[in-house]
Amino acid sequence: MPRPPSAMRRQILDSALRLFAEHGFKGTSLHDIAVEAHCSKASLLYHFAGKDAILAELLTPPAESLAAMNEQLATLDGDRAVEPAVTGFVGLAMRFRLEVKIIFAELPDMLDHPALAVIPTAVDQLADALAGRSREPRARVGAQMVIGGVAVTVASDVDVEPDSMRTELVQGALRTLGHRTS
């Protein structure tokens, strides 16, 4: 069983997440992270091998969560997959809003990162569920529009209360996919 992260390790991760989201991975130095985390660079390097190791630890939970969601969606056929795919994806995107922002800020470099190796396949699986397993162009394009639209929206600094954001994202995604909303 892995041991829980130390308070300093968590502080470093939280500081790095904020800085990467605000300034980008490339625009943030280890020194910046150490200053934000109120620790020395040596202390930071005691906890992490470098900036890339911090990024890997930050991006692993969203990638694993997406893969786990896709496993659950794999058991659903056709239209039965659409609504759980929409609500699940919106929930993940909102939960990992800053991580999504980091990925989108430097998308080509981020997709090559080892922590995100599962993302292309996971996104394809999500798109399949969002399309209701249909091969029709309308369903496939709509699914990609939902993936991009949700990700860009949560990565943006839209001044909307989180519950309202979640509701509007779900309803908008379902409309885009041609499903009735309640």
Image (cartoon, rainbow, N blue to C red):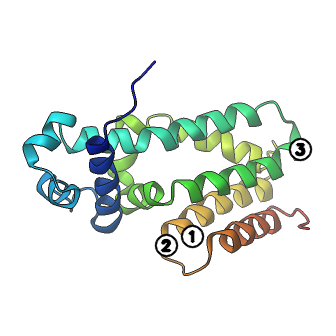
Q: Position of residue 115 (x, y in %)?
A: 39, 36
Residue 149 occupies which quadrant of the picture?
A: bottom right
The span from disc 3 to disc 1 (Cα, nearest Å) is: 25 Å
119 relative to 123 in the view: left or right: left
Q: Position of residue 38 (x, y in %)?
A: 17, 56
Question: Looking at the image, which residue is at 86% across and 64% down?
Answer: 178
Name the element at disc 2.
loop
Q: Secondary structure at mark 1?
A: helix
Tell which circle, 3 or 1, labels the residue nearer the N-terminal end.
Answer: 3
Q: Which residue, as the protein is rendered here, is positioned at the far front?
A: 7
**Up-down: is 68 above or below 36?**
above
Residue 6 spot, x, y in % from top left: 31, 37
Report which residue position mark 1 lands on. 153
Residue neighbourhood size for the residue with mark 2, other residues' Cα within 10 Å, grouped as few (<14), some (14–19), many (≥20): few
Res 156 label: 2
User: Of the residues shown, which amino acid type is indicated by label 3?
Assistant: Arg
- The reply to whether residue 37 is in sight is yes
Q: Of residues 90 and 11, which is closer to you in this image?
A: 11
**Contact, CB < 8 Å: mark 2 with mark 1?**
yes
Figure check: 163 above or below 134: below
State the residue position of label 3: 80
Could you tell me which secondary element the residue under label 3 belongs to? helix
Q: Amino acid at mark 2?
A: Ser
Q: What's the amino acid at mark 1? A: Thr
Residue sitting at 75 percent across and 64 percent down?
170
x and y percentages locating residue 17 in the rendered image: 35, 55
**What is the distance, in whole Å, between disc 2 and disc 1 at their CAs?**
5 Å
Q: Is residue 65 left or right of residue 145?
A: left
